Amino acid sequence: MKILVLGIGNLLLSDEAAGVRIIEALGQHYAFTPEIDIVDGGTAGMELIETMACRDHLIVADAVLTGSAPGTVTKLCNEEVPALFTRKISPHQLGLSDVLMALRLTDEFPRQITLIGVEPGSLEPAIGLSPRVQQAIIPAMQQILAVLRESGIGIREKTAQEKADYPTTCLSSSVPFTTESQI
């Protein structure tokens, strides 16, 4: 299987960065079998077409407006995903629905799509997540890990040295991990 875990969001708009922070934590703490790619899509748009094309499974982590309480983790699958992304939550957000439409037109649409979204509390210009959204990073990551396990992906927690060696671009405090039982 060719699986892509794609984190999207704008680091300069507080909770809009949730998707990027989720995949940073995922890469920091876990190692995977080779059939998976973890990509920070940031605010890129159509530049991601080749990266997303012809995937068996596309897993997207992002901030999403569902009307739920801030920090709520939402999981959507397949046709539910493009419908949600017709509404952009910030002027800089990836037009994921446009990319998905282009992939459909070129017959390169992913076979399966899963969205793990976190309801933002703040979209104001600021670096760092609000406390509720920061607390949602681990549950959102657990959802992604569960989806990957269902797909047969081998997952192992990284050693302390591997975690220390992992390059991180986090500008805010790191995700608090204390025990494996939290994951």
Image (spheres, helix red, strand yellow):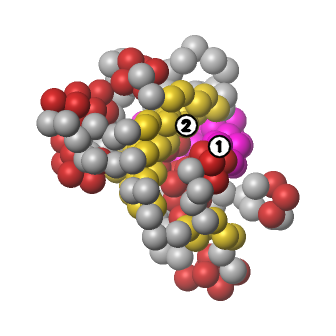
- The residue lying toward the viewer, choosing from 32 and 16, is 32
Categorize mark 2 by other alpha carbons within 10 Å: few (<14), some (14-19), many (20+): many
Q: Is residue 129 magenta?
A: yes
User: In percent of the image, x 67 and y 21: which residue is there?
Assistant: 69
Q: Amino acid at mark 2?
A: Ile
The span picked out in magenta is: 125-143
The C terminus, quarter of image: bottom right
Upstream in sequence: badge 1 or badge 2: 2
Q: Which residue is at the far left?
A: 106
User: In percent of the image, x 70 and y 80: which residue is there?
Assistant: 160
**Rendered image quadrant of residue 94:** top left
Q: Which of the numbered marks, if any, corresponds to residue 116? A: 2
Q: Secondary structure at mark 1?
A: helix
**Rendered image quadrant of residue 178:** bottom right
Query: Where residue 161 sits: x, y (%)?
Result: 65, 85
Q: Amino acid at mark 1?
A: Gln
Query: Where residue 47 sits: x, y (%)?
Result: 19, 48
Categorize mark 1 by other alpha carbons within 10 Å: few (<14), some (14-19), many (20+): some
Q: Which residue in the protein does label 1 denote?
A: 143
Q: Is residue 177 magenta?
A: no
